[in-house]
Image: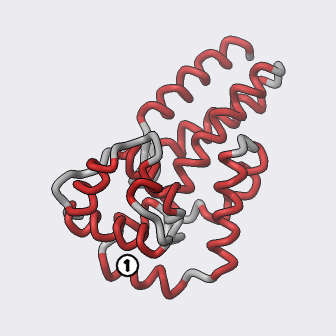
């Protein structure tokens, strides 16, 4: 996707929420950078895109999809699906990782409009749950969570080598205990 289209979508999402650029940027990026992104003269990093997605309460993949797919998604999404997803994201931000792991399954289908973002969230939650299980000495559960983290860290357009690497290192560490 070209940076002009992406910038336009970000700006439209911001205006739809009736937010100023200063309200969106917070301490994460500068207002000048957001202005450049919205005008298409700069492209956001993945982290910046994730941040903007969170602040604007719109899935990253919805910002990145081709125009015709975006229209299809807006038609097929129901308010309850969006509400469920926003509730899930709140739990993630509240660090309720096990709850998220249990509830996110419905969003992990490749055809789901929140698939890419859900894979990224699920991988991070599984990694955290693996660490917690390992600390409690439950190495079987830690192993299962680490495998899931490794698998989903490489899924979707928000794939993360960092999460994948952390999961693999954790798998290696857990293997020593089994």
The image shows a total of numbered marks equal to 1
Mark 1 Cα shell of 10 Å, populated few (<14), some (14-19), many (≥20): few
The answer to which quarter of the image holds residue 132 is: top right
The residue located at (45%, 31%) in the rendering is 162
The picture places residue 61, in percent across and down from the top left corner, at 42, 63
- The vertical placement of 46 against 166, above or below, is below
The picture places residue 109, in percent across and down from the top left corner, at 56, 65
Q: Quadrant of the N terminus?
A: bottom left
The answer to which quarter of the image holds residue 130 is: top right
Q: Nearer the viewer, residue 17 or 147?
A: 17
Most distant residue in the top direction:
176
Is 26 left or right of 172, judged from the image as shown? left
The picture places residue 127, in percent across and down from the top left corner, at 63, 34
Most distant residue in the left direction:
41
Q: Quadrant of the C terminus?
A: top right
The residue located at (49%, 62%) in the rendering is 56
Q: Which residue is mark 1?
A: 69
- The vertical placement of 141 against 32, above or below, is above
Asked whether residue 97 is in view, the answer is no
Asked whether residue 131 is in view, the answer is yes
* Scheme of image coloration: secondary structure
The residue located at (47%, 57%) in the rendering is 53
SS for dot 1 = helix
Q: Nearer the viewer, residue 19 or 135?
A: 19
- The vertical placement of 68 against 19, above or below, is below
The picture places residue 146, in percent across and down from the top left corner, at 63, 33
Is 87 left or right of 50, judged from the image as shown? right
The residue located at (33%, 50%) in the rendering is 31
């Amino acid at each position: 996707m070209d940076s002009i289209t992406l910038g336009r979508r970000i700006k439209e999402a911001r205006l739809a929420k009736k937010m100023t650029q200063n309200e969106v940027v917070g301490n994460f990026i500068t207002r000048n950078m957001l202005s450049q992104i919205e005008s298409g003269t700069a492209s956001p990093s993945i982290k910046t895109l994730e941040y903007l997605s969170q602040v604007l309460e719109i899935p990253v993949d919805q910002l990145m999809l081709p125009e015709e797919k975006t229209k299809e998604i807006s038609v097929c999404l129901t308010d309850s699906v969006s509400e469920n997803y926003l509730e899930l994201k709140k739990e993630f931000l509240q660090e309720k990782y096990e709850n998220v792991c249990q509830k996110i399954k419905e969003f992990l289908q490749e055809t789901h409009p929140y698939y890419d973002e859900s894979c990224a969230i699920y991988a991070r939650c599984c990694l955290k749950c693996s660490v917690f299980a390992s600390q409690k000495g439950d190495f079987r559960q830690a192993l299962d969570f680490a495998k899931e983290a490794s698998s989903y860290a490489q899924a979707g357009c928000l794939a993360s080598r960092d999460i994948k690497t952390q999961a693999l290192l954790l798998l290696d560490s857990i293997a020593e205990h089994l």
